[in-house]
Structures are given as C-alpha cells and as structure tokens.
Image (cartoon, rainbow, N blue to C red):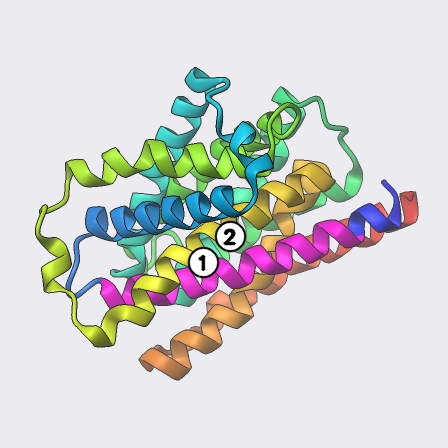
Amino acid sequence: MELLQIGRVVLWMTGALLSFSVMAVSIRMLAGALSIFEILTVRSTLGILILLVLAVAQPRLREEMLPRRIGFNLVRNSVHFVSQFSWALSITLLPFATVFALEFTMPVWVAILAVLFLGERVTVSRIAVIVLGFIGVLVIVQPGLETFRPASLLVMLASFGFAVFNIMTKRLTDTESTFGIVFWMNVMQLPMGLAGSDPLFPLRLGAYQIPAVLGVGIAGLSAHYCLANAFRSGDASLVLPLDFLRLPLIAFVGWWFFGEGLDIFVFIGAAIMLTGIVWNLRAEARRS
C-alpha cells in the first residue's frame, strides 16, 4: 500500500472517530427524553434530509440514489441497526471509556473476517493486532471479578455486529458510491426506528436539546461517510484498528462533561491494544 493511501485512510478515520465521539455524547444527552428507537429515528430522518438537499444541489448525485444491490443492503443495514441499538443502549448504562474500549474488539473481528471473506493478506503485524486486542479486552472486562458488568456483553455483541457490517461495507465500495451507500442505510433504517417509536416523540424535545439532535443527525451521517471512504482507500484490517484512537478522546469527554471516573484498567487495556495498531501501521508503511 502506498504512503498516500495510508495517509488517506488516517485522514478519513480521523473524521470518523471524531464523528462517533460527537454522536456518543449526543445520545447520552438525549437518553433522558427519548428511547433508543427514537434517537435512531432522529439520526435517520436528519440524515435523509441532508442527503436530499445535497442531491437537489448536485444533480449528479441523483443517479447514485438509484436502488442497487437492495438485498445485500437490507442485510447489511439490518445488522447495523441491531448493533447500533445495542451500542446506543450500552452508552446509557456504562461509562464512555468502557464502552469505547470494549468496542475495540471490532477491529479484531474485522481482521479475522477480512481474511476469510475479502481475501486480505495475513501478516505478522495484523496477527499482533488480534492477539493484543484480545489481551486488552481481558484486562478491561476482568472476567470473574466483581467489577465485571453484564452490560459489557451488550457492547461485545454490538462490536461483532459492527465488524460484519464493516466487512459488508468494504464489499459495497467495490461497486457503489459512498453517497449511495449512506443514503440507502438511512432510508432502510428509518422504518426500523419508527417501528419502536412514539409518533409524538418530537413533542418531548426542548429547545435546549436541539444541539444534541443535530449532533446525532450530522455526526451519524458524517461518521459513515468517512468510514466508507476509508474502506475505499485501504484494506479493512488496516482501517478499523485506527478506531482505537477514540479511547483517549472519549475518556476525557466523559470525565469533563459527565464526571465519569477514569478507570486505570481501561487505559492499561487500551494501551495494549494501541501497541498492536501502532505496530501494524509502522509495518504497513515499511511495506509500502
């Protein structure tokens, strides 16, 4: 992989991790007023509106909205909705740092699935990401100790679902545009969210919650736009481990805005995982 490609992957993943962090904070701020179904409905509705405005302003985008690979998209977006629901619910039950750290099992699953289903190559550094990732998870979860929280399993479920979703996203980027991928994700997930929502839920929102509503909608859209472009620029097993860099940011945000404690085991586990990703990036750069 060329250095320019690696640079593009890092740039797009930086946008994705910032967007996911904004979305997490926005979900926490809306959780008292809306259910998870309703929050996801807000995300899909705003996403569709933004994309339609862009399509009106840029006529060339309208062709990318035509229905293609609908069955594949439906399976992908259903897996993502269930995973997103589990992730959003876990944010209301666990500290930010714990949720994001446990979510770092996703790059491990992606690395395994990318080899099995995308034919990506196996290297020592990519194996190191998997091994160090599992060790980091064990440090964070501390199985068998009193500090273990059952809600952690919810994050693990979401993490595996996100891995499947991202492998399918990588496959879609071979034939579909980023705009089309994100558009159909929002269109298909809107009725899923509405199915569990109160039709009058917007009436429960106050003016002070508008920033959080915009955060869910805009960040939810930009996160997946950046992620799809990152997959377009590099291998899935290189792209997803960069997501580890979310942990220090979200841990600080949780401490600053919500008074969450900074568990030393979260950072020890994350440091072990981060060692793997740095090793892998350096190895990819040398191979280029």
Q: Residues within 10 Å of mark 1 (few under 14, many from 20)?
A: many
Q: Nearer the viewer, residue 198 or 286?
A: 198
Residues tagged 2 and 1 counted as in contact (Cβ below 8 A): yes
On the image, numbered disc 1 is attached to which residue? 219
Q: Amino acid at mark 2?
A: Ala
- Image position of 232 (left or right of 53): right
Residue 48's x, y, as percent?
Answer: 38, 44
Magenta part of the chain: 7-30
Task: Report which quarter residue 52 is drawn in.
Answer: top left
Q: Amino acid at mark 1?
A: Ala
Task: Give the residue at x 47% y 77%.
Answer: 252
Tell me if I can see residue 266 in this picture: yes
On the image, numbered disc 2 is attached to which residue? 223
- Image position of 234 (left or right of 262): right
Secondary element at tag 2: helix
Tell me if I can see residue 154 in this picture: no
Residue 31's x, y, as percent?
Answer: 21, 62
Secondary element at tag 1: helix
